[in-house]
Amino acid sequence: MRDKPYVGTPKRELTRLRYALLIGAALVCLFVWADLILLPHQMHSFYLVNRLLVQLPVVLVTLLLSFHPRFHAFKHWIFTALLIALTYSNYWLIHTSWSMHGYSFPYEGTILYAFYCIFALGIPYRYALVAALINMVGFLALMVFAPAYGDRVLISAAFVVGSLFIGVYAKYRLDSMMHLLREVNAKLIVLSSRDELTGLLNRRALMEESEQLMSLCQREKLKIAVLMADMDDFKKYNDEFGHQEGDNALTLQATILNDVFQRKTDIVGRYGGEEFMVVVSGLSEKEMAARCDDLLAIWKSKNLTHAKGASSSYVQCSIGVTVCDSANDHTLSELIKYADENLYHAKDAGKGQYVISCINSDKMQEN
């Protein structure tokens, strides 16, 4: 099968984010309990308003938004807005505590919120940088209008700005490493699933994807067909023109197969040596015959000179196909066996041709 684009947030990742939001809500409640023990009684009312009517609802609204079908498309903006909202609600608490009661409310929540949203919720580096700049400006302005920390204002501002910078830089390094890791993993997946010479699926990946398509056809009650193609007298060609030209001929076979079987669900791979396999769904015996005609016609149009003593003056291939009307009645191994048998029938009949059988109707067509 052709590669499918990534769509949506994986269910497990979405569950992890929801747990993180629930933990965030629980932490807000825990801070309420701890802070109320330390704060003067006259500050309890506006403190509870800040925590229970601003911060906690903001986290819970974010949690509810995670159930929206379009959440994945906007989650980074949502989490960035959450970070800014939590931070500025804390700034309001610091300002109110100082201006109304002369109390220096701790600023450490600014750093905790940043690290929570950046690392627990996974805000990407660019979004984290925007939020950090907005929060830095807000804290510096707060220190101008509400110098709650007295002679420690400068060191407090430097500590907040430095911590936000470190958090953003750490996220930049982490995102860079994850990007590099994804690239390496993608290359490893290609190397482990693709034939190095032709770029087609190798035998292991070919069988895995074919089994998946077989299961789909069984569930959806679709036709399934297996095509085996083998280049005629390939050893003679290799011996006369050399391995490099032999490799070029194999690559050309792969290109022709990809040109004929272009649907996203068509599975094309190198079965081994000069033998190739194609597995397709939903095509009738007549439609598969038309594709075999196309394969042979393209090879003929290439007019690639064959070796002396070959069965044909130009390079060609023989093809065996089996079409199954009911995938539930057979295994993939059985279909490959039938297609392989038809391939050898085509070879015995003179090469450069195809043999198709529909195993459920006992029909046989030779061309």
Image (tube, grey):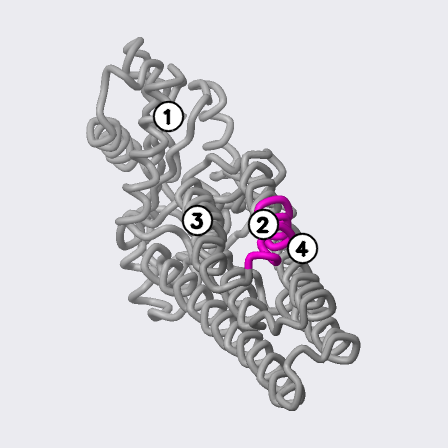
Residue at coordinates 34% horizontally, 55% vertically from top-left? 193
On the image, numbered disc 4 is attached to which residue? 81
On the image, numbered disc 3 is attached to which residue? 26
User: Given contact means CB atoms under 8 Å apart, are the residues at marks 4 and 1 in contact?
Assistant: no
On the image, numbered disc 2 is attached to which residue? 48
Q: Give the mark nearer the N terminus: 4 vs 3.
A: 3
Residue at coordinates 47% horizontally, 52% vertically from top-left? 24
Local packing at callout 3 (Cα closer than 10 Å; few below 14, some 14-19, many 20+) is: some
- Closest to the observer, 256 or 346: 256
Amino acid type, mark 3: Ala
Amino acid type, mark 1: Leu
Q: Residue 65, position in %: x, y?
A: 60, 39
Mark 2 or mark 1, whichever is nearer to me: 2
CA distance separating discs 2 and 1: 56 Å
Secondary structure category for the residue under label 2: helix
Residue range of the region highlighted in magenta in the rendering:
41-54
Mark number for residue 216?
A: 1
Mark 2 or mark 4, whichever is nearer to me: 2
Mark 4 or mark 1, whichever is nearer to me: 4
Q: Residue 115, position in %: x, y?
A: 51, 67
